[in-house]
Amino acid sequence: MRNTHWLLCPVCKGKTRIKLREDTALENFPLYCPKCRREMLINVNKLNISVIKEPDAQTQSR
């Protein structure tokens, strides 16, 4: 069996409920952290994690 690693939250470095293998590839994955209660979109490729920055929604004024 290949080595598995827990996916750590990029914000608080807490352990999430997701395990990754060395050959795991994720795109636009909605990661939820139960410790800091944040949800973010991430990309994972060969255990390299990158957070996708999305612009905040702006309110429309008339």
Image (cartoon, rainbow, N blue to C red):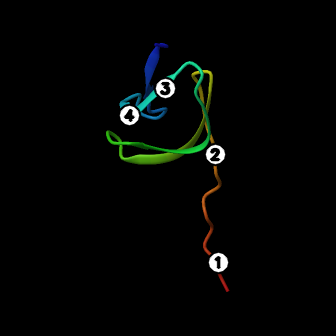
Q: Which labelled disc corresponds to residue 20?
A: 3
- Residue type for callout 4: Thr
Outermost right residue = 62
Q: Residues within 10 Å of mark 3 (few under 14, many from 20)?
A: some
Foreground mark, 3 or 2?
3
Compared with 17, 32 (above or below) is below
Outermost left residue = 35
Could you give the CA–CA distance between mark 3 and mark 2, rounded to whole angstroms? Answer: 22 Å
Q: Which residue is mark 2?
A: 53
Residue occupying image coordinates x 63% and y 42%: 52
The image quadrant of residue 8 is top left
Could you give the CA–CA distance between mark 4 and mark 1, rounded to whole angstroms? Answer: 35 Å
Residue occupying image coordinates x 49% and y 32%: 10
**Quick one: label 1 or label 3, which is nearer the N terminus?**
3
Compared with 33, 48 (above or below) is above
The image quadrant of residue 28 is top right
Mark 2 lies on a secondary structure that is loop
- Residue type for callout 1: Gln
